[in-house]
Amino acid sequence: MGYPGVPVDVQHFLLRIDAISVWVGKAAAWLIIGLMTLVCVEVFKRYIMNMPTAWIFDASNMFYGTLFMLAGAYGLAQNAHVRGDFLYSSFRPRLQAGLDLVLYIFFFLPGVAASFTRAMTMRHFRGGSASIRP
């Protein structure tokens, strides 16, 4: 496993980053157990005991967001993410890398920013805050 056409010192650096991503991804996979436990407790409290809680919903969203972000690096390091491979596999590695970079910049980063801004916007709408007072 290496990066063809890349200097050895850069390859060593990239392989070390990949190893860190794999380790973090495997460690983050254990968050699924915590997430499952929170959801099961919430279902039990809400439907069996008729005592719903607000904090479990928030905590499960935080667990899921953390898991998604930490496992995303693992998915990229293992080349396990979904892509339209019918054209991509016929491209040269340099073109594949360039296409990956462009797609991450134009789709992944705005998607992450949109998810954060959506949450903040909804919180402000629920709270009744506004930037312009009539």
Image (spheres, rainbow, N blue to C red):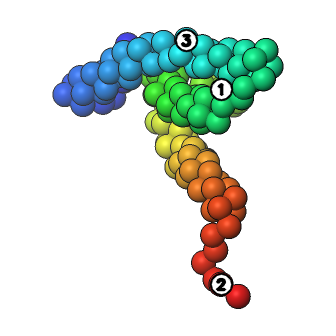
User: Is there a contact, CB below 8 Å, between mark 1 and mark 2?
Assistant: no
Residue annotated with mark 2: 133
Q: Seen from this angle, which residue lies furthest bottom?
A: 134
Q: CA distance from mark 3 to mark 1?
A: 24 Å
Question: Could you tell me which residue is drawn at 33 percent across and 17 percent down?
Answer: 19
Along the viewing direction, whichever of 70 and 104 lies nearer the viewer: 70
Q: Quick one: SS at disc 2?
A: loop
Tell me if I can see residue 43 in this picture: no
Q: Position of residue 103 (x, y in %)?
A: 58, 44
Residue linked to disc 3: 33
Q: From the top left corner, tell me how far across and down residue 78 is, in percent.
A: 49, 17
> 44 above or below 3?
above
Position of residue 30 in the picture relative to residue 82 (left or right): left
For disc 1, the marked residue is: 82
Q: Amino acid at mark 2?
A: Arg
Residue 120, by quadrant, is bottom right
